[in-house]
């Protein structure tokens, strides 16, 4: 039984980096609340500018920040008074105290490895139980991760065959990506009039598509825009590249607030794009999507009942698909999996 007023849960995710991570976290939090878990959130932020993959570089960046910060004189005064700069944001950092009841690695393709090592060490040190919910892609499992997965993790669900194959020895169950539950409600579409294009450029490190894929997509996107489609961007750099590519008057939606961005999806009847969690955000509202394959994450997903195609098949797929039926199936799919995932959570110690 927790001695805290609420269950304190450390969530491994990112904030203000890739909205897909935040959509996943929205879905997990919705599942927890539906299961009856009363909790407060502690973010373990894997944003690459907060946590590099190299511990020594993290320490170097924190040290040199006193000299390169916008106000180095204030930083240095704080440093001389014995104050520490633990992280560049308001998120978890290592402590000698047990400040949490539970750890959840939230539906990510980065559920192990260097960026998560601090969290695994902390959870092991304090014997904090945990879960991996909706994780994907194979990761390198080190000694610490192996011990934690073997002895402390109560639930593992995966969203693709790569993670399932690797985590099956630890009791993993094949399920869906929690982004399917990110929206507060889901209902079938009644028309096929409004198309959203989740535009992803080629300029952002670890958050872009190959230039050759983008070159194939641009003429297809132009045709759709000429027919009344709207661009929707997850990243500010994509806004700039979208305007550069299609002009300043291109219809475009964007918000750096993930809740507002998720709400932008609900106005569409079909969503098309290269971002897996663009399809996921739409699916959570009951809106079907076309996912353009370009990497490992976009080759084998079935969490969102999306149609996976290459660029040259987009227009034919739009014309040949029964989108109203697809949406009905999607709403039922979400409803069925929400109950399954909620019941799995109820079997953990989160309700003790």
Image (cartoon, grey):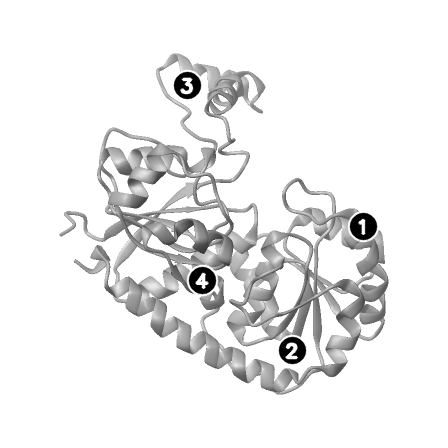
**Helix, strand or loop under label 1:** helix
Residue in view at x 50 percent, y 34 percent: 50
Q: Is the residue marked by circle 1 packed among few (<14), some (14-19), or many (20+) residues within 10 Å? A: few
Spatial separation of the CA atoms under disc 3 and disc 2: 53 Å
For marks 2 and 4, the one nearer the N-term is 4
Q: Position of residue 305 (x, y in %)?
A: 56, 72
Q: Is residue 64 above or below residue 343?
A: above
Of the 4 image quadrants, the one containing the C terminus is bottom left
Residue in view at x 38 percent, y 22 percent: 84
Please indicate, yes or no, whether residue 266 appears anywhere in the rendered image: yes
For marks 3 and 2, the one nearer the N-term is 3
96 horizontally vs 243: left or right: left
Q: Position of residue 154 (x, y in %)?
A: 27, 53
Q: Is the residue marked by circle 4 packed among few (<14), some (14-19), or many (20+) residues within 10 Å? A: many
Spatial separation of the CA atoms under disc 1 and disc 4: 31 Å
Q: Are marks 1 and 4 in contact (CB under 8 Å)?
A: no
**Helix, strand or loop under label 4:** helix
Select label 1 or label 3 by which is in front: 1
Spatial separation of the CA atoms under disc 1 and disc 3: 49 Å
Q: Is residue 226 above or below residue 45?
A: below
Q: Is residue 323 above or below residue 85?
A: below
Q: Are marks 2 and 4 in contact (CB under 8 Å)?
A: no
Spatial separation of the CA atoms under disc 2 and disc 1: 28 Å
Q: Position of residue 96 (x, y in %)?
A: 24, 28
Spatial separation of the CA atoms under disc 2 and disc 4: 21 Å
| Disc number for residue 178 | 4
Based on the displayed image, in which of its 4 quarters is residue 216 positioned?
Answer: bottom right
Residue with the mark numbered 2:
269
Based on the displayed image, in which of its 4 quarters is residue 127 positioned?
Answer: top left
Residue with the mark numbered 3:
78
Residue in view at x 35 percent, y 71 percent: 340
Residue in view at x 60 percent, y 70 percent: 306
């Amino acid at each position: 039984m927790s001695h805290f007023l609420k269950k304190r849960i450390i969530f491994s995710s990112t904030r203000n980096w890739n909205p897909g991570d935040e959509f996943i976290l929205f879905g997990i939090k919705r599942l927890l609340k539906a299961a009856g878990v009363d909790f407060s959130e502690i973010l373990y932020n894997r944003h690459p500018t907060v946590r590099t993959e190299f511990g020594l570089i993290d320490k170097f960046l924190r040290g040199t920040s006193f000299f390169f910060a916008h106000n180095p004189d204030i930083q240095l005064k704080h440093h001389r008074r014995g104050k520490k700069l633990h992280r560049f944001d308001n998120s978890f950092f290592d402590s000698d105290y047990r400040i949490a009841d539970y750890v959840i690695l939230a539906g990510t393709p980065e559920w192990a490895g260097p960026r998560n090592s601090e969290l695994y060490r902390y959870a092991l040190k304090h014997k904090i139980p945990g879960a991996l919910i909706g994780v994907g892609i194979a990761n390198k499992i080190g000694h610490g991760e192996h011990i934690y997965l073997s002895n402390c993790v109560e639930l593992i669900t995966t969203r693709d065959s790569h993670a399932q194959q690797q985590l099956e020895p630890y009791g993993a169950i094949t399920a869906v990506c929690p982004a399917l539950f990110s929206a507060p409600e889901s209902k079938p579409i009644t028309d096929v009039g409004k198309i959203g294009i989740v535009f992803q450029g080629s300029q952002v490190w670890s958050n872009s598509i190959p230039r050759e894929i983008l070159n194939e997509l641009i003429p297809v996107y132009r045709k759709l825009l000429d027919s009344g489609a709207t661009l929707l961007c997850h990243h500010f750099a994509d806004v700039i590249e979208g305007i550069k590519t299609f002009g300043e008057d291109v219809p475009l939606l964007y918000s750096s607030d993930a809740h507002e961005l998720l709400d932008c999806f609900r106005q569409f009847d079909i969503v098309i794009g290269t971002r897996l969690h663009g399809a996921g955000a739409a699916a959570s509202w009951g809106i079907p999507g076309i996912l353009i394959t370009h990497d490992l994450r976009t080759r084998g997903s079935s969490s969102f009942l999306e149609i996976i195609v290459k660029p040259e098949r987009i227009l034919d797929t739009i014309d040949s698909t029964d989108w109203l039926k697809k949406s009905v199936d999607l709403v039922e799919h979400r409803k069925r999996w929400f109950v399954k995932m909620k019941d799995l959570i109820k079997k953990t110690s989160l309700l003790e």
